[in-house]
């Protein structure tokens, strides 16, 4: 998919806004947690992982497009899938 | 028209302008190096940084005294926010650091990074590897659990069996004036000050040499200078940043999934009911020491000497493997030896894990160690045959047959040499221990002489085979080129 909406600047902006919002939310949750029990620790680990992974996706998107290329759609999809899984796992814990 | 930059681009530009990260003194990196296998060493450093951060937080609560070490560790586990998680991340990242360092070394071995002009880099890297193992050894004792103290006692006992000057020096370094308190304090000091400082100094030296020589080029293809180069900032830095984030995510998730459980506190009574077992990265060495012929002080010294020889061979690799060829296809002997080493480490470690405290009969050891070497060698030779058959298809039929027959003979000779080597080393060691124990019977001496002769023949045969298998200068290449010349003259 090298053209159209998925390669367009609007799609990239949407992704950046979504990932940054996710990171801010995860950072807020981490700040508010006071984990001494195992479920709270798991929540901490999951949200920290979400933060790191979102950052990695952002960095990859920027680096891939920097030289006029496109990020590998499969890698990006796997990244988003893992993000969804991490957030879902957090729901399962509680 | 001025280039239009987005928010991220402007942010990257701002950082670069302030910190000078893309300054030309940092060598650009060829595009082929944007591959995780090229960054195993960098990921080891990332693991070290995570170790440093988690370790510094734990240091705020930990008390290095035999009476309080366990209770302070328990306090971190139970009371400190994320304390158990912190301990788990620290331990698992240490495991990852050791595993990554091992993978980094093995990759370097297989792709010949130790060859000119990177010999010194290899030596420094090996020293860094030993410091990394030192981190594992010293850190293991600190929680003062029955598991950690018993395993450390085994390690300290091994050190005392080493030859005299080394033994005294190491004992002074790790045990101090003697007693539990002095030992724990020494281990703590080594773990948090001396070893990190040593690793940082070695890292700076290695980074300087890396900057000077550049990333090792692949064995084939154009030189790095003819390839597309990427600036160190932002492209390479961001790539490494992404790898580090993924590594960190993996570590966090593994730590959350498999949280650490604190074993019981060390007391002499608890230790007497526990079978000591070192951590997994020392298990392969420990398994060798458990072989029945290495029992007793002389046996232990013999086993440790053998292991020292293996380590020395690894350290001095650049001066042993001096061939110019870097291609895997042209280094069958060294590649096979590397595979045998990695295979033996894996098999011995697993075997050690499932046989804690058991003495291993010598026949069983010879069968497992020799069998592993034999199986890997046969697998390697078959793979080389397959590789060469593809290359052979490009040769004239006569030359192809010539190479094919020579390969078959060499392959059979190599398998025979490995088997004979395993048997003669086993026989020689057995008789050395018997002689040391006072058994001077004619049979023992004859077996000893026979084993040594066989070992000598194996060494000579291996040297000859190495010459034959060198496709660039060895007999196969020469015979094929004579054949081709003859073909062209007709």
Image: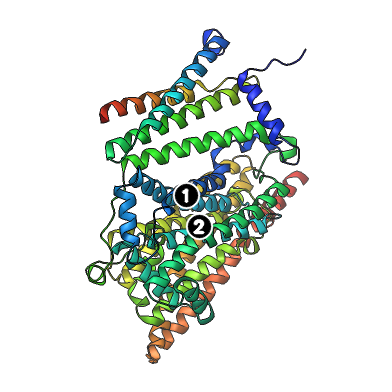
Residue ID at (43%, 56%): B343
| Residue A60 % position (x, y) | 55, 27
Q: What is the chain identity of the residue bearing mark 2?
A: B
| Residue B30 % position (x, y) | 68, 36
Q: Is residue B304 left or right of residue B207?
A: left
Give the colour scheme shown.
rainbow
Q: Is residue B385 among the parts visible in the rendering? A: no
User: Which quarter of the rendered picture does the C terminus of chain B lie within?
Assistant: top right
The residue carrying pointer 1 sits among few (fewer than 14), some (14 to 19) or many (20 or more) residues within 10 Å by Cα, namely many
Q: Which of marks 2 and 1 is in front?
A: 1
Residue ID at (62%, 57%): B201
Q: What is the chain identity of the residue bearing mark 1?
A: B
The residue carrying pointer 2 sits among few (fewer than 14), some (14 to 19) or many (20 or more) residues within 10 Å by Cα, namely many
Residue bearing mark 2: B132
Sequence-wise, which precedes: disc 2 or disc 1?
A: 1
Quadrant of residue A24 within the rendered picture: top left
Q: Is residue B361 above or below residue B1?
A: below
Residue bearing mark 1: B51
| Residue B149 % position (x, y) | 34, 66
Which residue is at the far top?
A: A4
User: Which quarter of the rendered picture does the N terminus of chain B lie within?
Assistant: top right
């Amino acid at each position: 998919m090298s053209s159209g909406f998925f390669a367009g600047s609007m799609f990239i902006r949407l992704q950046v806004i979504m990932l940054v919002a996710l990171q801010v939310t995860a950072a807020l949750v981490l700040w508010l947690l006071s984990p001494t029990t195992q479920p709270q620790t798991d929540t901490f680990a999951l949200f920290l992982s979400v933060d790191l992974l979102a950052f990695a996706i952002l960095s990859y998107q920027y680096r891939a497009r920097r030289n006029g290329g496109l990020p590998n759609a499969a890698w990006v999809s796997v990244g988003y899938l893992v993000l969804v899984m991490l957030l879902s796992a957090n729901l399962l814990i509680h | 028209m001025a280039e239009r930059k987005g928010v991220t681009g402007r942010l990257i530009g701002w950082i670069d302008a302030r910190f000078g990260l893309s300054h030309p003194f940092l060598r650009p990196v060829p595009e082929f190096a944007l591959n995780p296998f090229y960054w195993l060493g960098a990921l080891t450093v990332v693991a070290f940084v995570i170790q440093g951060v988690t370790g510094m937080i734990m240091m705020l609560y930990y008390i290095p005294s035999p009476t309080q070490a366990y209770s302070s560790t328990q306090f971190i586990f139970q009371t400190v926010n994320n304390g158990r998680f912190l301990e788990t991340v620290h331990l698992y990242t240490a495991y990852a650091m050791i595993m990554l360092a091992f993978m980094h070394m093995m990759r370097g071995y297989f792709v010949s990074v130790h060859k000119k002009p990177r010999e010194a880099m290899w030596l420094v890297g090996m020293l860094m590897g030993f410091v990394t193992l030192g981190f594992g050894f010293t850190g293991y004792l600190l929680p003062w659990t029955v598991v950690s103290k018993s395993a450390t006692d085994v390690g300290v006992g091994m050190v005392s069996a080493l030859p005299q000057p080394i033994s005294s020096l190491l004992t002074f370094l790790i045990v101090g004036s003697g007693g539990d308190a002095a030992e724990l304090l020494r281990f703590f000091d080594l773990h948090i000050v001396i070893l990190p400082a040593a690793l940082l100094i070695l890292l700076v030296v290695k980074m300087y040499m890396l900057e000077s020589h550049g990333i090792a080029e692949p064995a084939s293809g154009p030189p790095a200078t003819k390839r597309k180069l990427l600036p160190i900032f932002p492209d390479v830095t961001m790539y490494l940043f992404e790898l580090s984030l993924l590594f960190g995510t993996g570590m966090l998730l593994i730590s959350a999934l498999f949280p650490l459980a604190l074993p019981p506190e060390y007391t002499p009574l608890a230790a007497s009911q526990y079978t000591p077992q070192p951590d997994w990265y020392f298990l392969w060495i420990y398994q060798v020491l458990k072989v029945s012929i290495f029992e007793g002080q002389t046996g232990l010294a013999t086993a440790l000497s053998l292991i020292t020889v293996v380590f020395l061979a690894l350290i001095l690799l650049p001066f042993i493997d001096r061939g110019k060829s870097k291609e895997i296809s042209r280094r069958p002997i060294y590649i096979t030896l590397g595979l045998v080493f990695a295979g033996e480490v894996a098999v011995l470690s697993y075997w050690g894990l499932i046989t804690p405290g058991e003495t291993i009969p010598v026949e069983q050891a010879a069968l497992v160690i020799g069998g592993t070497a034999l199986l890997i060698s046969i697998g390697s030779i078959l793979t080389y045959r397959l590789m060469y058959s593809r290359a052979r298809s490009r040769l004239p039929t006569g030359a192809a047959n010539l190479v094919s027959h020579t390969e078959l003979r060499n392959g059979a000779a190599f398998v025979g040499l490995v088997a004979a080597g395993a048997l003669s080393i086993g026989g020689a060691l057995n008789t050395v221990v018997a002689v040391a124990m006072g058994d001077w019977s004619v049979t023992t001496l004859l077996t000893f002489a026979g084993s040594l002769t066989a070992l000598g023949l194996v060494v000579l045969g291996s040297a000859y085979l190495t010459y034959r298998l060198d496709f660039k200068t060895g007999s196969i290449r020469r015979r094929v080129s004579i054949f081709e010349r003859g073909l062209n003259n007709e």
